[in-house]
Amino acid sequence: MGWFGKLCLSLSVLNNKGEKLTMKKAFIILLGLVAMMPVRAQSEHTFEVAKNLDVFNSLYRQLDVFYVDTLEADKLIRIGIDAMLEELDPYTVYYPEEDMGDLKMMTTGKYGGIGSIIRMRKDSTVIVAEPYAGMPAAEVGLQIGDVMLKIDDKDLKGMSTSEVSELLRGEPGTTFVLQIQRPGEKKPRDIKITRRNVKVAAIPYYGLIGDAGYINLTQFTEECAKDVRKAVISLKDKGAKSIILDLRMNGGGLLNEAVDIVNLFVPKGLKIVETKGKLLASNSTYLTRNEPLDLDIPLAVLVNGRTASSAEIVSGALQDLDRAVIVGSKTFGKGLVQSPRELPYNGSLKLTTAKYYIPSGRCIQAIDYKQKRKDAEIYRTTGKRAEAKDSLANQHIFHTAGGREVMEGSGIMPDVVVKHDTLANVVYYLSADDVMTDWGTQYFQKHPTIPAVKDFAITQEDFEELKRMAKDNDFKYDRLSEKRLADLKKTAEFEDYYEDAKDEFEALEKKLAHNLDRDMDKHQKDICKIMAQEVIKRYYYQAGAVEDSLKDDEDVEKAIEVLNNEGEYTKILRK
């Protein structure tokens, strides 16, 4: 007998008149109890919400009245809100009125401003890091490395990049004067700039690589599916026999745009993604609604660990439908759907409302944030960490349209995995250091023009100049061997072994001594790549940087190899 039957039997007892209840009457009573349970649970939940909101409101009022110092309501309440949301997942975010531009930028790719990336140097000054082609910053001649001093009469000294960014943004058509200090010049420059609607290109570059058409899609913003469509048509007109869609580093965006992009290559009426949440309103099914552009052209999609959300819907759906070969490394694993909710005083809450499921029925969400919170709470209360779980242990197997096995719960695993060498520390730190920017600025000032991207190359003389500047600027980088040796030395001292091994430690320290010349020479090839990027983006902007990055791109080379081999391409999609 199951649990339900046992429960009914247990209710077959004497009633208050001394009569035994029949199984039928007991079953009716049980149904009534079950029906009341959700109502009671909901009522208790509602009471808990009301109680805690009342406590929070009362607590803040007591603080506001009696605390020794005057409180800043906006700041303190915001800290409380952020701390509460931090307990959920990283995608549930509060946007007050002053930050709504960030939310609009994420969903539309548009904002009112000058069209430039900015960053902070080590000396805490904010500089132009990259102006966008065709936007106000580029049109008035702002250059990478320009130090921002003032916006109108507002001194920018000591401001963060977010504070400066807020001042640069504004209503399209408004004008301000930006004072900059250009490297190599004695006097500051005053530059008048008029803000306008800035739209970051979803496709900074597309072009032919041999017979393959390459499309670099960086985000899923409004109408990006139309941009992809135009790019495919243009590439086919130029002779493309196959298409490579690059979704590496693409963090996602609008779900409907993802569906429309998949629709370019699959028939009308197919289910691409389904969302399921706590409320019925969160449950939706997204079907392809247009006639496809091309059902037959061989297609490869490039992905990596920073391919997420809508980019995973595209790559995952095309994999589930056996329509494209996925090349690269495992994706991030974000299977959560966010929806904006309006708040008082023109704010908004972007919150997770559902999980999404692609055609095979799988959800690719990799992190269980609810379990992560439980593990964190156990660690806080007991000091014990949760046991490491086998990431594959609880995964279910699903099948593509053609019967291939695919897994859920860990992102999209490529059909063709490409392993990459780890970037050396000296290369990583050099790519983000001020010395690289300064070298690029000097190069730009000395060379009015450079060859086309395909013909441009860094010379040995250029490399030696960067080495000289790095040494002159006392460039430092994090060396793991030095840290590990220091840790081992401390342990040896603590355990009283150091004196016996002192000579060995000193000899090893000499061998591991900082040698910038040696380390830069050893990794010259990789350093020259980032040097080329630093130069090219100053002349050819983001499009040029993408084009240059395709030289010696292992993922692209592997994709072309598969696309050019019809037998291999077919075998992958049918195995």
Image (cartoon, rainbow, N blue to C red):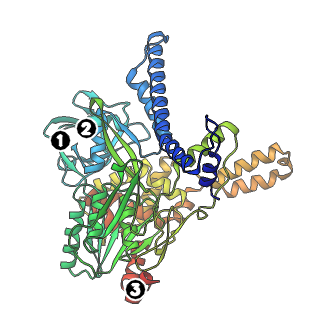
Q: Secondary structure at mark 3?
A: helix
Residue drawn at 60 percent across, 50 percent down: 8
Residue 317 falls in which quadrant of the image? bottom left
- Residue marked by disc 3: 570
For the residues marked 2 and 1, what is the alpha-carbon distance in whole angstroms? Answer: 8 Å
Query: In which quadrant is the N terminus drawn?
Result: bottom right
Q: Secondary structure at mark 1?
A: loop
Q: Position of residue 265 (x, y in %)?
A: 28, 74
Q: Secondary structure at mark 2?
A: helix
- Residue marked by disc 2: 168
Do callouts 2 and 3 mark residues in contact (Cβ within 8 Å)?
Answer: no
Q: Amino acid at mark 3?
A: Thr
Are there few (<14), some (14-19), or many (20+) residues within 10 Å of tag 2?
Answer: some
Do callouts 2 and 1 mark residues in contact (Cβ within 8 Å)?
Answer: yes
**Left or right placement of residue 373 versus residue 433 in this view:** right
Q: Residue furthest left?
A: 173
Q: Position of residue 200 (x, y in %)?
A: 25, 53
For the residues marked 3 and 1, what is the alpha-carbon distance in whole angstroms? Answer: 51 Å
Sequence-wise, the earlier of marks 2 and 3 is 2
Q: Position of residue 141 (x, y in %)?
A: 20, 48
Q: Nearer the viewer, residue 193 or 146?
A: 193
Q: Amino acid at mark 1?
A: Arg
